[in-house]
Image (cartoon, rainbow, N blue to C red):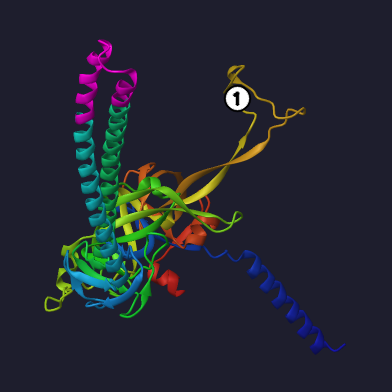
Amino acid sequence: MGKTTKYILIGLGVVVVILVVLIATKKPALTQVATDKVAVHEINETVSASGKIKPHIEVKISPEVSGEIVELPIKEGDVVTKGELLCKIRPDILQSELDRAEAQYNTQKATIGNAKELLNQSQAALENVESIYNRDKPLHDNKVITDAEFEVAKSNYFSAKAQYEANKENVVSSTYGLAQSQASVKEAHDNLVKTTIYSPVDGVVSKLSVEKGERVLGTQQFAGTEVMTISDLSQLDVNVDVNENDINRVQLGDSSKIEVDAFLGKSFAGTVIEIGSSANVVGTNADQVTNFTVKVRIDPDSYKNLLVRSAANPNPFRPGLTGTVEIKTNHAKSLAVPIQAVTTRGQKKAANAAVTSNNGPGTAVPVDSTNKPKITALAKEYVFVYKAGKVKQVQVTTGIQDDSYIQILSGLQGGEEVVSAPFAAVSKDLNDGMAVQKVDKSKLFSGTGQ
């Protein structure tokens, strides 16, 4: 090996040694973090849910009698008033039933008249034979007339009396028959009236399911045909499904912000007016979701600038539109930090430490036969307070929260700097007393923080 080669190898070895030393002595890069100050903020806790817009008053119209629709003067979208004609069903058959019932009623009236006349005749005959019987009885007692003559008078009297009682009962029976015929007339008349349907409320024809000439079924014997729906659009609700985990936070009168998909970029005010008592269970037994229906009334003042004054129906909303509701369930103005600044960490604790038990306070509770402590994790909430290049892990108690901030009930005084980003560092990497590098949040997320 030549001297030149030897010197080259020695030089390379020196370079390698220097590089190894430099790598070994190089300080690791500090974790870069961004901070926010603990300050007083207004926090509005909300519950979000989606649903459909529905009129508070919505009447589904179905006929009570069956038949062909012969008049349908309205169309879908028309504004109608209470008592206005909606549709008419062909009345021919029901008119014939009314005529037949009236004829039967008149026949029954004649029958009762005849029965009363027979009653009067039998009463006159009874009075006549009764006078003969009363005259012959003392004559028979005094042996003036024979037994045969008295028996004839007696027989005639009791026969006339029985006939009178029979005619009297016929009058009662005819009276009941007349009442029955009168009820049949009333029923036939009511059925005839039901062929004409009038609007029960003021509103808008939000749905029309039939056309003129169609046959419909009545509700007297069948489920009936739903011919139309009348909606009162002056009072609109958003019916949303709230999960069982959130329903206890919702109260009647809670204010709400409503966003409707058909009106992007606009929000409307609302108020909770009704909370369902029965659960709506969706899904299979293995994957069930339990919700409760909550009705949120839309405040008309919040959409008055969208009203079309020139239209018969000025309301901009249509039943069935999709809306998202944020119900404000709680409000506080207090110390708060960004939500991402709070993390949950587990704390190891011996399960057989001195606790209050049935054996008395301070008694050690052994876990197993070896009497070795069993380690469990107790989750607590912490923030990392930044000061002079290091962070301090501080336990806090939190309250309500919104989309940006979470309330701090204890652990901080206000004015401290807490690490708020990146969340991965807050939730996993940071430890108590750890040195960090503070950078601007914009530089942190742009990757240029140095």
Q: Looking at this view, is 350 or 170 the one in front?
A: 170
**Bounds of the magenta span?**
128-154
Examine the structure image and report whether residue 421 is included in the region drawn in magenta: no
Q: Amino acid at mark 1?
A: Ala
- Single out the residue that lies furthest toward the left: 310
**What main secondary structure does the magenta stretch of the protein show?**
helix
Q: Looking at this view, is 278 or 358 the one in front?
A: 278
Q: Position of residue 276 (x, y in %)?
A: 37, 49
Q: Is residue 399 above or below residue 218?
A: above
Instruction: Quickly name the residue at label 1.
Output: 354
Give left or right: position of 6 versus 184: right
Q: Quick check: can you spot residue 410? A: yes
- Name the residue at 69% across, 70% down: 20
Q: Position of residue 434 (x, y in %)?
A: 51, 53
Count of picture labels: 1
Dot 1 crowding, Cα within 10 Å, few <14, some 14–19, many 20+: few
Image quarter where the C terminus lies is bottom left
Element on which disc 1 rests: loop
- Name the residue at 27% across, 74% down: 265
Q: Position of residue 242 (x, y in %)?
A: 41, 55
Q: Quick check: can you spot residue 448? A: no
